[in-house]
Image (cartoon, helix red, strand yellow):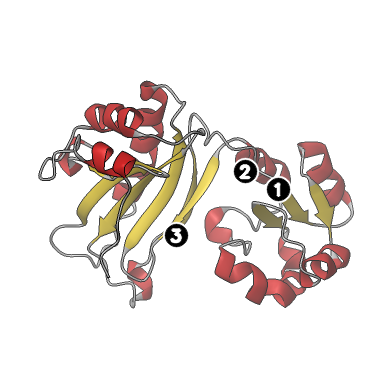
Amino acid sequence: MTQKHGKKYTAALAKVEAEKNYTLNEAVTLVKEIDYANYDASVEVVFKLNVDTRQADQQLRGAVVLPNGTGKDKKVIVFAQGDKAKEAEAAGADVVGAADLVAQIQGGWMDFDTAIATPDMMAQVGRVARILGPKGLMPNPKTGTVTMDVTKAVSDAKGGQVTYRTDRDGNVAVPVGRVSFDEAKLAENIKTIADTVLKSRPAAVKGVYVEHVSISSTVSPAVALDVNAL
């Protein structure tokens, strides 16, 4: 079934040249112009990569701190005990706990954006892996969320860190800010994640690595980026 769009979307789409790959600055300007949400919409960049995600060595996963943040206040929880729990609280974590926090999540509580854990807590956190995993919230060393340096992890999470990973089709989608951000800040955030994705090219990938890149707001049509300009 063909999805039908409203008049506002159709009008926005008319301003996007279908076959054009825009420069980063052009694309950011256009996405801000064609956004028609009556709220401060999120802006997202999507990379279509020529990777075979069935192969473990061709899967991308990591985290990067965006220089201008995401425009969202993140609620951060930390699984820790003893001195590390005190350290997490001092760093500004919203909720800190151990077995009690695991039980809370088992009971259905999910009011947080990022979960961090010290390595010694992972056996307990494993009890809620089936809950956290599908939502992308399971602490993982690759994203810096399993660490003894909880101060840095909390600071990064609060300060604009985003995680990225390939989905089954080889796409990487990352939030890079809000429509209200000025163009230079949005462009800088996009350039930061683009540099990270480009540097993460798996050695096994042959030929073209990045097949397509686009940015869009929550409601706007996607605007294609010139990969070579990144």
Q: CA distance from mark 1 to mark 3?
A: 20 Å
Among the 4 quarters of the image, the one containing residue 57: bottom left
Q: Is residue 103 above or below residue 24?
A: below
Dividing the picture into quadrants, the one containing residue 9 is top left
The residues bearing labels 3 and 2 have C-alpha atoms spaced at a distance of 16 Å
Q: Indicate the position of residue 119 as horizontal and vertical percent values.
A: 71, 63
Look at the numbered disc 3 and give the secondary structure of its residue. strand
Residue placed furthest toward the front? 7
Q: Is residue 50 above or below residue 189?
A: below
Can you give x and y, in whole percent of width and height, for residue 118 in the image?
A: 73, 58
Report the front residue among 178 and 119: 178
Viewer-proximal residue among 206 and 74: 74
Name the element at disc 1.
strand
Residue 92 point in image, percent of width and height: 77, 38
**Mark identifier at residue 160:** none
Specify the amino acid type for callout 2.
Ala
Say what amino acid the circle numbered 1 marks. Answer: Val
Query: Marks 1 and 2: CB-CB under 8 Å?
Result: yes
User: Residue 217 placed where, x, y %?
Assistant: 39, 41
Specify the quadrant that holds the C terminus. Answer: top left
Residue 157 shows which numbered tag? 2
Which residue is denoted by mark 1 in the rendering? 76
Q: Which one is in front, 98 or 27?
A: 27
Q: Residues within 10 Å of mark 1 (few under 14, many from 20)?
A: many
Q: Earlier in the sequence, mark 1 or mark 3?
A: 3
Q: Which residue is mark 3?
A: 61
Considering the image in quadrants, where does the N terminus appear? Answer: bottom left
SS for tag 2? Answer: helix
x 77%, y 67%: residue: 105
